[in-house]
Amino acid sequence: MKLFNTRLALALVACFAAHGAMADEVQVAVAANFTAPIDAIAKGFEKDTGHKLVASYGATGQLYTQIKNGAPFEVFLSADDTTPAKLEQENEIVAGSRFTYAIGTLALWSPQTGYVDDQGAVLKKNAFTHLSIANPKTAPYGLAATQVLDKLALTDTLKPKIVEGQNITQAYQFVSSGNAELGFVALSQVYKDGKLTSGSAWIVPASMHEPIRQDAVILNKGKDSAAAKALVEYLKGPKAAAVIKSFGYQL
């Protein structure tokens, strides 16, 4: 019996060691608008694959600079499709790995119930002090916000009232903290399971700005990473798709 127990113990140790060897960590650069979805996806990914997802968040332009400066990212989830395409042209990604994981939705939001109407007329009324947007030079959602203001012929009128966040997370924080009465945010920041989580919002029609097509790539540092490949496959699967859609993204 003692010999049997010893063999069983050794077998279990070998099994756990093999599982540990297969499990890996993947370093992921994530556009700030996708913070909540990737946090939710990470739980299922880690449970289903054994791999651990370690995310770093920021504006797409800032993350691009970090990647070019040698940051240890293996996968990049961008807030646009142009930055991953640029990295592809610069031979910074694994060939054939680029794909669209989500199409973003822009929203004009206020934490105050009833403050923002469902047509965005609050912008034309101009009865507010500050309007928050993300930096349009580095954040695709910020660029989309400026395109909406151009479309409404409000750029010059509202320019003195605009406060810029470094990324979409900071743009949201300006509004949620009360430093701005309203602001353009990613719908995913204020939306879950088919409804607003707080306040009032105008979900901006996609026709009012260029599509916010969000692409993902495996970077060269993730070329030989089983965890990086597993994450990309997981993002293309039904479980991740359900999470992504629940935050108001299109697929």
Image (cartoon, grey):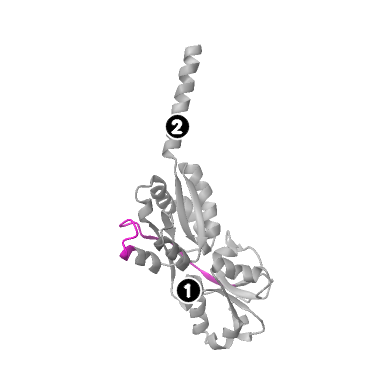
Q: Amino acid at mark 2?
A: Ala
Q: From the viewer's perspective, tell me whether residue 64 is left or right of residue 164.
A: left
Q: Position of residue 70 (x, y in %)?
A: 41, 58
Image quadrant where one finds the C terminus: bottom left
Q: Nearer the viewer, residue 17 or 141?
A: 17
Q: From the viewer's perspective, tell me whether residue 192 is left or right of residue 242.
A: right
Q: Which residue bears the numbered disc 1?
A: 206
Q: Which residues are magenta?
A: 88-108
Q: Position of residue 205 (x, y in %)?
A: 50, 75
Q: Nearer the viewer, residue 182 or 86?
A: 86
Give the label on residue 183, or none: none
Q: Which residue bears the numbered disc 2?
A: 17
Q: Is residue 91 visible?
A: yes
Does the segment drawn in magenta span residue 72? no
Q: Is residue 243 visible?
A: no
Q: From the viewer's perspective, tell me whether residue 248 is left or right of residue 77.
A: right
Q: Nearer the viewer, residue 86 or 105?
A: 86
